[in-house]
Image: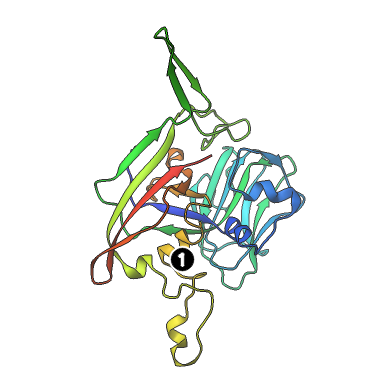
Amino acid sequence: MARQNVGTPRFYIDLGLYQQSIGAWTPEDDQKSLVQLNPTNVVGKPNNDIIIPRISPIRYVAFLGHSGGSYYPLFDDTDVDGFTEVVNMNGSQETDEDYSGFSIGIFSDREDADGMKGVIGDEDSTIGAVSIGNYYDMPHSPDLNLKLTTEYDGVKTIQTKGGATLSNASYTKPADWGSQGAWQLGGVSNFRSGRRVWDLSFSYLSDTDIMPLNAGNSYSSGSEADDFADNILDGTDFFSQVINRTMGGHLPFIFQPDKDNANPDQFAICRFDMKSFTYDQVANNVYNVKLKIREVW
């Protein structure tokens, strides 16, 4: 059992949130609450399937706070290829109906697709959020001097004039997803308290892993066109896929501190808790990076 150890982290970056933030896509009225990466407001099946336009690679789907029925991804109207279950999805690319709660699956991108459908299959289905986008795996695990903190920032304590200690808790854990706990399987309650915070350092990262070849969305012309075949939408580096898509700390994402550990307690909705991102050069084209990732709800 891996407990809460950090391995090679994975970031699931929501393409619908990013497109909303830049004004490139507006969801239908009865779907707006489902595409904010906030599963606390559980609703019934929307009138139509949730369709996220493909402006860049799409390689994961997550159904959060679901109960009843089945849920599955489609590129346009076609099954995905290379499907792999991360948690609670079966070989037919659907959520496991025996376990309500949340489900995540990854698959191969399809460049010719116009978009991806998050299909909610049955009229009796309820769901809190549908997240569709791309995931990024760090090139390697963080340095050994990482720090994992559990915060209780919702607890306020005062001492009276008589010396008594009074405590008030406005919150102690993530809000429930409807009638079930956050990040639970089988419709059970969440008994874990506290807010998780990860302070991670990564050493000796190549510039090709963390910096875009072309930090824009245009292609050059002429003899150098081949040098700019990639842009910030389809770049595979950390800045293009993660930092830019989350606007730094503005947009939330799903964080898995160890991509090889799919226990339900290994997932969190997070934001970067940083005002800036600094690359410290330690050798030619080699950099060190520090990240602070904070669980949010």
How far across and down, in percent of the image, does residue 174 sit?
Answer: 52, 34
How far across and down, in percent of the image, does residue 199 sit?
Answer: 34, 45
Write down the quadrant of residue 294 in the picture. top left
Q: Quadrant of the N terminus?
A: top left
Secondary structure of the residue carrying tag 1 is helix
Q: Does residue 2 appear in this view? A: no
Q: Does residue 136 appear in this view? A: yes
Q: Quadrant of the C terminus?
A: top right
Q: What residue is at 47 percent from the left and 56 percent from the top?
A: 248
Query: In the image as oriented, which residue stretches furthest toward the left?
Result: 283
Query: In the image as oriented, which residue stretches furthest toward the right?
Result: 47
Horizontal arrangement in the rendering, residue 281 relative to residue 129 (left or right) = left
Q: Nearer the viewer, residue 1 or 256?
A: 256
Q: Nearer the viewer, residue 42 or 287?
A: 287
Q: What residue is at 42 percent from the left and 71 percent from the top?
A: 212
Residue beneath disc 1: 240
Label 1 CA crowd tier, 10 Å (few <14, some 14–19, many 20+): many
**In the image, residue 142 above or below residue 154:** below
**In the image, residue 198 above or below residue 80:** above
Q: Nearer the viewer, residue 121 or 226?
A: 226
**Residue type at mark 1?**
Ser
